Image (cartoon, rainbow, N blue to C red):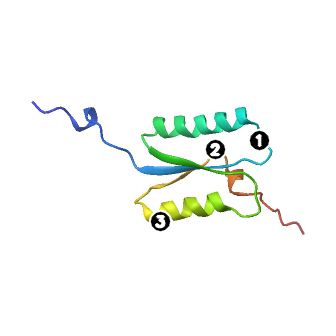
Amino acid sequence: MEPLTEQRHVPGPLVFGFLRLVRVSRACQLALTRAITEYCRRHELTLAGVYMERGSSTPSAFVGMLDALTATQSYGVVLPTPSHLGSVRRITD
């Protein structure tokens, strides 16, 4: 009898992680990377890599991640928090 599909190794959807590391300690960087890795493991996602932006004026890691997304059949991007996409400006009257 053949094993059930759930008992075979089937790769999950391919995703990339993204971190903005502005004035962040090495310990915090490692913790955020572990959080992304653990999230992907729990949700059966295949983490292809984590792009890290270090606060330079040119968002080269973000652009590289966008290039990787278009070059692969990836599912999406995993962030530890929405603030990793940039600060939110509130409009007040």
Give the mark toward the camera: 1 or 2. 1
Q: Label 1, label 2: how many angstroms apart (C-alpha)?
A: 14 Å
Secondary structure under tag 3 reads helix
Which residue, as the protein is rendered here, is positioned at the far left?
1
Image coordinates of residue 59 in percent, x first then y, are: 69, 62
Instruction: Describe residue 66's horizontal placement relative to residue 5 as left or right.
Output: right
Q: Label 3, label 2: how many angstroms apart (C-alpha)?
A: 22 Å
* Residue at the spot 46% in from the left edge and 36% down from the top edge: 41
Q: Report the residue marked by disc 3.
A: 70
59 or 35, which is in the foreground? 59
* Residue at the spot 82% in from the left edge and 62% down from the top edge: 90
Image coordinates of residue 15 in percent, x first then y, are: 48, 51
Q: Report the residue marked by disc 1.
A: 24
Determine whether 24 is above or below 70 in the image.
above
Q: Report the residue marked by disc 2.
A: 80
Q: Crowding near pointer 1: few (<14 within 10 Å), some, many (20+)?
A: few
Instruction: Describe residue 41's horizontal placement relative to residue 65 as left or right.
Output: left
Residue type, numbered disc 3? Thr
Secondary structure under tag 1 reads loop
90 or 1, which is in the foreground? 1
Q: Label 3, label 1: how many angstroms apart (C-alpha)?
A: 29 Å
Confirm or deny contact between disc 1 and disc 2 (CB under 8 A). Answer: no
- Where residue 65 sits, quadrant-wise, is bottom right
Residue type, numbered disc 2? Pro
